[in-house]
Image (spheres, rainbow, N blue to C red):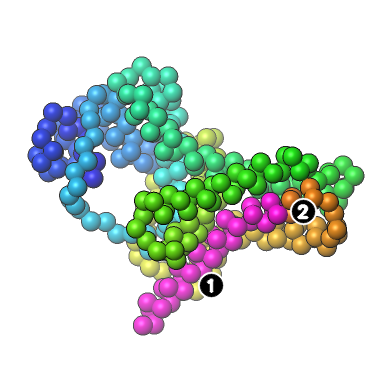
């Protein structure tokens, strides 16, 4: 639990309140323009020289998202809110001029930076689909990218998977099955986070949507409705991959690497569909048990 506005207070006393009322009033209250108002308030408090104190004591309990659709909605709000906070506090985060220390600025920026990678993944997926379609319809104008260009991209994908596995192994006390499940759940959120980051860069009008904490009835429709975009992109990439392998089954190394990259980039969309279906299947088990 982070206690904002707790400067010069004993940690035991600070643990009794999440945000000091005087600090909240001094900072100007909650920012009604931001849908991640707690993170935004914490940044403003730090900009004014207050400190955040961690107290290892449970002060309240929350309810987790009811299903994958609610999980997506929550993470989408966090990603969109992070972009709007970075835009609203760009001067303080990137140029200084406040009482934020260099390390505080670094932690805020690097904490949200990986989500911009998800936005690039989404854009790259769309670009890959367009180029693959060109390779099928006009192969003379759309050759397979050179191997020297594809290998670094494949290595980066492999490094990211290895990094995630290593972090879970080092920091989260869980077994192999739980690590794989957590990695799959994280991968399933890549399209959602990517779309939310891109939307946050061009619009500031998104309303606050409360995360649903109540389970809905189990059905295939409820499982597929939250992942229509992911299902469409997965089927598109899969169709393009099958068509390319059927048309040029014996092409060169660059072509094979392109097909491999196409398959790898389809995995987050497949993971999203799978996670949504599994969350509905779990509800069915709960309703029938």
Quarter in which the N terminus is drawn: top left
* 284 is within the stretch colored magenta: yes
Mark 2, other Cα within 10 Å: few <14 / some 14–19 / many ≥20: some
Badge 2 marks a residue whose secondary structure is helix
Q: Is residue 13 visible?
A: yes
Q: Which mark is residue 220?
A: 1
**For residue 8, which quarter of the picture?**
top left
Tag 1, which secondary structure? Answer: helix
Q: Is residue 246 left or right of residue 111?
A: right
Indicate which label's residue lies in the foreground, 1 or 2.
2
**Residue located 85% across and 58% down the image:** 250
Q: Residue furthest top?
A: 97
Q: Is residue 147 magenta?
A: no
Is tag 1's residue or tag 2's residue first in the polypeptide sequence?
Answer: 1
Q: Position of residue 26 (x, y in %)?
A: 20, 26
Q: List the residue tagged with mark 2.
A: 256
Q: Which mark is residue 50?
A: none
Q: CA distance from mark 1 to mark 2?
A: 35 Å
180 shown above or below 106: below
x, y percent for residue 73: 44, 53
Residue found at the far bottom of this picture: 289
Q: Is residue 97 left or right of residue 73?
A: left
Q: Is residue 195 left or right of residue 10?
A: right
Write the start and end of the magenta stretch as one range. 260-289
Is residue 254 or residue 243 the one in the foreground? 254
Q: Quadrant of residue 101?
A: top left
**Is residue 205 among what the camera can see?**
no
């Amino acid at each position: 639990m982070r206690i904002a506005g707790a400067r010069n207070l004993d940690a035991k006393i600070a643990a009794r309140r999440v945000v000091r009322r005087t600090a909240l009033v001094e900072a100007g209250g909650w920012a009604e323009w931001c849908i991640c108002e707690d993170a935004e308030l914490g940044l403003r408090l730090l900009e004014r020289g207050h400190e955040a104190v961690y107290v290892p004591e449970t002060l309240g309990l929350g309810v987790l998202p009811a299903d994958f659709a609610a999980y997506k909605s929550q993470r989408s709000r966090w990603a969109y809110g992070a972009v709007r906070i970075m835009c609203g506090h760009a001067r303080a985060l990137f140029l200084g001029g406040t009482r934020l220390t260099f390390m505080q600025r670094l932690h805020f920026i690097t904490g949200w930076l990986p989500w911009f990678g998800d936005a690039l993944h989404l854009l790259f997926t769309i670009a890959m689909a367009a180029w693959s379609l060109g390779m099928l319809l006009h192969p003379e104008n759309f050759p397979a990218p050179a191997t020297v260009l594809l290998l670094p991209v494949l290595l980066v994908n492999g490094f990211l998977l290895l990094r995630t596995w290593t972090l879970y192994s080092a920091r989260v006390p869980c077994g192999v099955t739980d690590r794989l499940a957590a990695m799959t759940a994280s991968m399933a959120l890549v399209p959602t986070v990517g779309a939310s980051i891109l939307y946050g860069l061009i619009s500031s009008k998104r309303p606050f949507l409360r995360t649903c904490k109540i389970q809905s009835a189990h059905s295939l429709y409820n499982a597929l409705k939250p992942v229509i975009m992911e299902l469409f992109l997965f089927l598109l990439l899969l169709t393009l991959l099958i068509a390319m392998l059927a048309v040029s089954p014996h092409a060169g190394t660059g072509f094979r690497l392109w097909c491999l990259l196409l398959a790898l980039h389809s995995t987050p969309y497949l993971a999203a569909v799978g996670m949504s279906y599994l969350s509905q299947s779990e509800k069915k088990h709960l309703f029938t048990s």
